[in-house]
Amino acid sequence: MINAYVQPIVARYLRSLRQGLDRAGIPAQLLLMQSNGGLMTDAAAAERPMNIIESGPAGGVIGAQALARAKDLPRIITFDMGGTTAKAAMVEDGEISRAAEYSVGAGIMIGSRLLTGAGYTLKVPAIDLAEVGAGGGSLVWIDAGGSLQIGPESAGANPGPVCYDKGGAVPTVTDANVLLGYINPMHLVGGALKLNAGKARQVFADTVAKPLDMTIERAAYGTHQIAASNMIRAIKAVSSERGRDPREFALFAFGGNGPLFACGMAAALEMRRIVVPPSAGLFSSFGLLYADVEHRYSRTFRRLLRQARLGEIQAAWDELSRQAADQLAAEGYQGARARLRRSAALHYKGQSYELTVPVPDGPIDAAMVAHLEEAFGQEHQKTYGHRAGADEPVELVSIQVIGQGLRDGPGVPERLNPSRPEPAPPPPRPAYFGPDHGWVETPVLRRSDLSTPRFGPLIIEEYDSTCVIPPGARASLDVASNIVIELGA
């Protein structure tokens, strides 16, 4: 139903885009990001647009995976916060966690267990993202019980936050961050958008601070903390709810607002390292450069592994592999540029949910059955904290093949160099870091200034994002110009 609903619009748009490229003399192949993190051709996307519904968030996760592999970061949790939503995903040992289904159209994307029974469920693979309605434009309001609430409604880009001075009358998270001194009213989008901090202060005082009998800075800081706590739900959904300890991961923060909130969220979760890539506000586009074309094929194939006819399973997997290879060949990916990967969804007999594990190359024989049972048991232990005994039968639920068309060209560059030059930093300004620290005169730096490690408090202002480093944290640049922040240093 979802595919049929969006297909005419997407097909018409892609056809128009292709025609425009042809008229401009650009013969390059047109590829689109899928929700699962792979690329697909415009022809395939026009036929199956349901696969690109969550393509934007997927790009950032793929970019983070590429950098994590290149920089030998074995475990990261990605945190992508923009104007309306915040999204989290997990990359473990270089591999992205994926969900077999997710929901759309409910105001929150549920690839995790944050919410169930809302929206429309899509039975297509996607990066396992947890998304909450918290962004820079999220509205700040007081409910009937007198409690401060954030979102999920957003001011959007028009009229936008009160400080945009375009008619917005309800304060937002961005207004709170301006009042806290985190965002420079004269620097947003490199100074192209001047902010009216005075108007934001007056509206915040009238609608939030006075009704709660608080000072403006305490109300603004409370807004910042509540927004962070809402987003921590997303991080827990892809880590602790999956049996992973977030303290063992680095937080990889990007998006226009991700670096602003990352340190506070990491501290609350007892995470010690934060990585902020160059051009953090535009980072989702980076993943498009390093993704491969992917086609996924699956078949329900319920069999108890120890009682199954292994030749039957082998034949079914071979058939899926042929379909994947034929599709890749039709798109020009053959030989060394084509790669097939197998996986299997398994559960213990009687369970209503399954876990997916990779299947190595090789024949489906008794040794492979033993390998699959052990791999499933280990994944069950990681996810749920326990596994059954050796006598518990494991059931195969479905088999999958991923056909990958590998890109040409080099891998991740040693250094990302944004073309926009760094302007001279503004003078220090007061920033509020909670009741323990109060207002602190905070240096405002460029990213390159961290080539010599510095201790917070610091604010790193860039064209597309602002990074806030709290008192006591240590910030430096690595060889790839990533900001690396160590908490508790």
Image (spheres, rainbow, N blue to C red):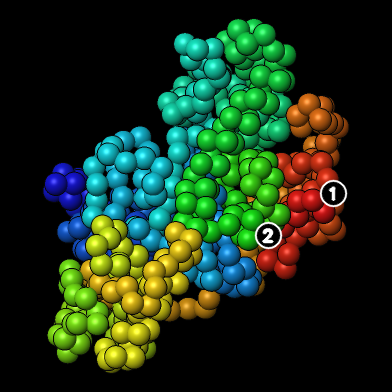
Number of numbered discs visible in the structure rendering? 2
Q: Secondary structure at mark 1?
A: strand
Q: Relative to 16, does residue 432 appear above or below in the rendering?
A: above
Q: CA distance from mark 2 to mark 1?
A: 16 Å
User: In the picture provided, is 263 more to the left or to the right than 130?
Assistant: right
Residue 445 % position (x, y): 79, 45
| Residue 455, numbered label | 1
Is label 2 or label 1 in front?
1
Q: Amino acid at mark 1?
A: Phe
Write down the residue under mark 2: 482
> Does the image show residue 130?
yes
Residue 321 % position (x, y): 22, 82
Q: Secondary structure at mark 2?
A: loop
- Residue shown at 61% from the left, 25% from the top: 223
Q: Relative to 432, does residue 70 appear above or below in the rendering?
A: below
Residue 254 % position (x, y): 57, 50
User: In the picture provided, is 353 more to the left or to the right than 239?
Assistant: left
Question: Which image quadrant is residue 301 in?
Answer: bottom left
- Residue shown at 68% from the left, 32% from the top: 183
Decide which of 136, 438 is in the foreground and name it.
438
Decide which of 487, 12 is in the foreground and name it.
487
